Image (spheres, grey):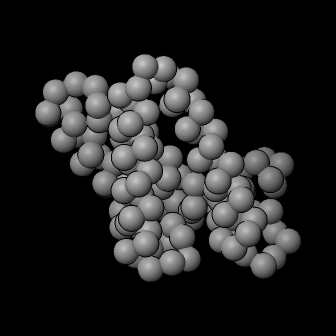
Amino acid sequence: MTASLLPYAPAVTGAVLLVVLVVGVLSGRAKGRWTLLAAGIVVIVAVGVVLTAVGGGPVTEDPGAELTALFTITLPLLVAYVAGWLVVRGGWLRRFLVIAISALLLVAFPYAAAGQATADAFLSGR
């Protein structure tokens, strides 16, 4: 999967993403699924901020590097959670497409480049 998601082994990263996917599936099947979607996104962003602050972020005072680290940690978790939430609605073709697109996003999306582009756009005053 994404080796840069967490500074751990790829097996641990894969297990974390699988757990987040299952939590997304469970929240998508629950009665208050819209509330759980919003709450899950807020929790994942908070966890991403904590993980970035504790150990995933760079040892620099550059806010652009910190935002890049935040993107690298948080966005894959969000993709897994939302994919799990979406996969419970619809038929088997939609489920397959949601999992395939999310797997492609997890593997091929340039999280660090997106974080750096966001940092450049918002932090440099453009």
Q: Residue at point 43% right, 19% down? A: 31
Residue 124: which quarter of the image? bottom right
Give coordinates of residue 120: x percent, y percent: 72, 56
Q: Is residue 118 visible?
A: no
Q: Is residue 87 visible?
A: yes
Residue 84: which quarter of the image? top left
- Image position of 40 with respect to 89: above or below: below
Residue placed farthest to the left in the image? 92
Q: Residue at point 35% right, 28% down? A: 29
Asked if residue 16 lies left or right of residue 103, the reply is: right
The quadrant the N terminus occupies is bottom left
Q: Residue at point 29% right, 31% down? A: 88
Give coordinates of residue 91: x percent, y percent: 16, 27
The residue closer to the viewer here, 74 or 14, is: 14
Q: Residue at point 64% right, 56% down? A: 48
The residue closer to the viewer here, 28 or 74, is: 28
Asked if residue 56 lies left or right of residue 29, the reply is: right
Give coordinates of residue 105: x percent, y percent: 37, 53
